[in-house]
Each structure stands twice: as C-alpha cells, then as structure tokens.
Image: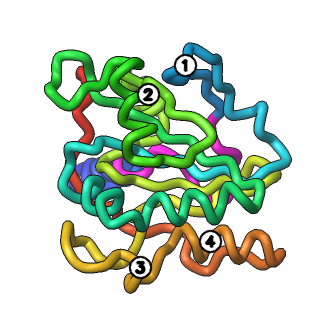
Amino acid sequence: MMKKVLALFTTLALAASTFAVEIGKPAPDFTGTDITGKTVKLSDYRGKIVVIESYNSDCPFCHHHYQTGAMQELQRDLTARQVVWLLVDSVNPKNFSYRTPAQARAELAAEKIDVTAWIDDHTGDIGHLYGMKTTPHMFVIAADGTLVYAGAIDDRPSPGGDPRKAKNYVRAAVAELLAGRPVTVARTKPYGCGVHYAN
C-alpha cells in the first residue's frame, strides 16, 4: 500500500514539474523590465490576446525560425491584429548567450523582430513561473487572461526546413480565438534548446 502511495506522489510531482501552468486557468501575472527599461506587466494587457515566447537566438532552433524570417512574419501578422507578443529572454548573465539591453536592442533591429516587448528575464523569474523548458517555448493567453495554449511553436521539431510548411500551433490558436472558437490543440511538447537559467 505504501509503495502505491509513494508511486502516486511521485507521479503527481512529475506532473507538477512538467506543467508549471495550467490550461484553462488564469495565466500567472508577472512584472518584468524590457530592454528599453520600461516596466512590463502582463495584467496591463488584459482584454487582448497575448503570445509569450521563450527566446535565445543562439539556440539553433530559435535561430532557424528567425533566419528564415518565419517567426518575424508570424509576429508581424499577429501584432497587426492587435495581438500582444512578449519575448522573454531568461538567459543568465554568465552564459555566452546573454544579451545586455544594448546588445538586445541591436539584435532586435538587425533581425527585424516585431514584438510588443523584449523582456530581460536574466533572473529567470518569469521563465520559472511559466515552466519554460526550451527555446522556443510558446504560450497563448486569451483576452480574458486564461491560458489556452502551451508548448511548441509548430509540429516540426527540427532546426532545418521551411517553418512555414509546418503546422504552427500558435497561429492556429490565435486564429481560433479571433474567430470566437475554443482552441483545438491546447498543449504540445515544446522542443528546442534548454533555457540557460542561473539556477
């Protein structure tokens, strides 16, 4: 009996660690600072659809989405529809992939990244709050603040090929929200590089 109880607790603990946020529940609020020094608070965007992207351009998976221009096209398309896109960079300052705010601003311009804000999360607070495992790791929040999607950007877990030919889960989720329909695919397994947290 004791073994069964321990097994149950182990299973629950693993489930809790795998999914830090729950689909269908309010998305955890957070406050961060963007690369211009502006304070960004998730709750300030209540009433709008929000996309959150875990980012590290040195990751081959992230790099490929940006090198092809597919990610920027998606950003432009969605932000043109009044969707808020928050890029969260949780790389710690001791890692070679860390970008200072000045470096991040230069990268934003050079790569033509079209987001509402690039949040410097070098403490990892937001990343840990959302259980961001990989770069990219995507989240979609409905206008009422409910988390409706968490997982991979698309169904092509490869740093090669044309991302535009893959099934893009973020695009699909936002399209369904804009059409007033429930999100069909609410959770997938994220792929990419591990997030370089400080701890």
Residue type highlighted by circle 1: Thr
Distance in Å between CA atoms under marks 1 and 2: 8 Å
How many marks do you count on the picture?
4
Q: Quadrant of residue 37?
A: top right
| Tag 3 residue | 164
The magenta-colored residue range is 17-28
**Dot in front, 1 or 4:** 1
Q: Is residue 1 visible?
A: no
- Earlier in the chain: of badge 3 and badge 1, it is 1
Q: Is 114 left or right of 112, judged from the image as shown? A: right
Q: Is residue 73 visible?
A: yes
| Tag 4 residue | 173
Residue type highlighted by circle 3: Arg
| Tag 1 residue | 36
The secondary element bearing badge 2 is classed as: helix
Quarter of the image that includes the C terminus? top left
Residue type highlighted by circle 2: Arg
User: Would residue 26 be counted in the magenta stretch?
Assistant: yes
